[in-house]
């Protein structure tokens, strides 16, 4: 089903984003909307070099309207983004607003869309960690209750929405757009070889990412996580660490820079290269949300370094949870002892790669019902 264009057609569909994972998971929706899409980047995590890597690979086919919203606190970012989006919506008169996930940018998009009387569509609705210490938990609850259409990735997410009294007609089970993102971005085997060789990495390694505030902003936890991972490197298995700038900052600021000596530290990678590294790793250790989903498509095992997760669907199969880095090395050693082939036939709980198509079809019906 194509989006209606031409005279009398509804206005464009605004797609609001502010961070790398949103760009990755909204890419297929943006590609499908084509000329009917109005891509708006709030500037929440806008790094020009990283953004150009991401967009070159995602093939958005359109430059986003950049709002350049800064602000030192979450409240300032939120207020500034809502005001800037309100002005953008007044100028471009979209017919609907799509937001994804649980960021400040997504909440701002939902608030501004609602204030402008536009239908709001929430992609990846219904996730719950039930951990009220995480700002993302509040963001996702508020967005779901504002949204006119909650696109839930799994039956578990549908259950959360229903339990909070969201009416069935506002809920659509779509699968998760991460599946098609991975299928689109994962390079061929020979390019994966070239990525690993180009970075000078060994054939066997553990891939580590740590950037969440609960780990990076707490020096005791950060020391614990990295010391436990240093023990894995001491076992003789190299640990490859694409270090997020935030984590490097915190490490050096807290006199923990020496811990990096144990790891093969590399720069954050563009999405396709990072997927290649995940796919070739013996094991992944990460606090990322998106990585928890990606491993289910790549059939890799993951140790999640977090207090809580909003993605219970992968726990016990692809992933296990280790809070605060406590006994992380033991958890990693036991995950390494598992047979990697055992995951080969375990289906991803996130669907078959059709979520973006289903979302766009639902948006067409919402803005042009006849
Ligand atoms: N990612 C990437 N390069 C990296 C590390 C991660 O492209 O060096 C991708 C990863 O594959 C996933 C997304 O970034 O798609 C996850 O983003 P992040 O960990 O920043 O946020 P979260 O998913 O925790 O919200």
Image (cartoon, rainbow, N blue to C red):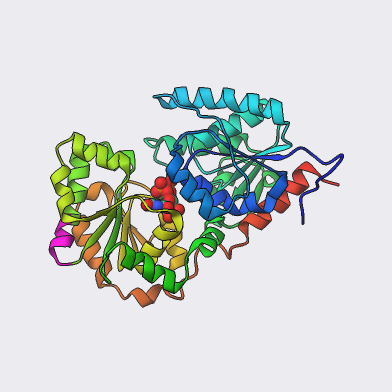
Quadrant in the rendering for residue 146: top right
Residue 74, how many percent across, how many down? 43, 27
Residue 232 in magenta?
Answer: yes
Residue 285, how many percent across, how many down? 30, 57
Residue 107, how many percent across, how many down? 54, 33
Asked whether residue 357 is in view, the answer is: yes
Establish if 28 lies above or below 76.
below
Residue 70 in magenta?
Answer: no
Establish if 107 lies above or below 325.
above
202 relative position to 319: left or right? left
Residue 312, how many percent across, how many down? 43, 55
The mark total stands at: 0
Task: Return the residue nearer the eye: 362 or 38.
Answer: 38
Task: Return the residue nearer the eye: 313 or 273.
Answer: 273
Establish if 248 lies above or below 198.
above
The residue shown at (15%, 41%) is: 256
The residue shown at (18%, 40%) is: 220
The residue shown at (25%, 46%) is: 324
Please provide the residue range marked out in magenta: 230-236
Asked whether residue 127 is in view, the answer is: no
Quadrant in the rendering for residue 133: top left
Q: Quadrant of the N terminus?
A: bottom right
The residue shown at (46%, 50%) is: 53
Which secondary structure class fits the magenta region best?
Answer: helix
237 relative position to 171: left or right? left
């Amino acid at each position: 089903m194509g989006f209606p264009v031409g005279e009398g057609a509804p206005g464009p569909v605004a797609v609001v984003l502010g961070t790398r994972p949103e760009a990755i998971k909204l890419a297929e929706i943006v590609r499908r909307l084509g000329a009917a899409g109005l891509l708006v980047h709030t500037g929440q995590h806008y790094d020009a070099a990283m953004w150009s890597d991401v967009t070159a690979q995602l093939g958005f086919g359109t430059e986003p309207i950049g709002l350049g919203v800064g602000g030192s606190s979450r409240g300032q970012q939120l207020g500034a983004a809502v005001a800037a989006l309100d002005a953008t919506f007044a100028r471009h008169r979209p017919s609907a607003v799509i937001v994804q996930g649980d960021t400040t940018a997504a909440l701002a998009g939902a608030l501004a869309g609602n204030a402008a009387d536009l239908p709001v569509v929430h992609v990846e609705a219904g996730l719950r960690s039930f951990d009220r210490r995480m700002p993302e938990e509040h963001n996702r609850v508020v967005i779901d209750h504002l949204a006119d259409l909650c696109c839930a990735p799994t039956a578990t997410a549908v259950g959360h929405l229903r339990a909070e009294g969201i009416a069935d007609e506002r809920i659509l089970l779509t699968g998760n757009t991460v599946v098609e993102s991975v299928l689109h971005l994962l390079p061929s085997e020979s390019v994966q070889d070239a990525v690993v060789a180009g970075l000078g990495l060994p054939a066997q390694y553990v891939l580590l990412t740590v950037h969440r505030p609960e780990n990076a902003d707490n020096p005791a936890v950060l020391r614990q996580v990295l010391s436990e991972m240093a023990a894995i490197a001491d076992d003789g298995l190299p640990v490859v660490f694409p270090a997020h700038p935030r984590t490097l900052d915190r490490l050096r600021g807290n006199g923990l820079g020496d811990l990096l000596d144990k790891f093969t530290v590399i720069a954050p990678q563009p999405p396709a290269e990072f997927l290649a590294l995940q796919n070739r790793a013996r094991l992944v250790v990460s606090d990322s949300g998106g990585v928890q989903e990606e491993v289910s498509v790549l059939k890799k095992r993951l140790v999640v370094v977090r207090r809580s997760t909003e993605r219970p669907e992968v726990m016990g199969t692809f992933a296990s949870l280790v809070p605060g880095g406590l006994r992380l090395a033991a958890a990693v050693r036991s995950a390494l002892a598992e047979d990697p082939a055992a995951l080969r036939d375990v289906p991803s709980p996130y669907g078959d790669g059709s979520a973006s198509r289903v979302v766009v079809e639902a948006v067409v019906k919402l803005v042009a019902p006849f």
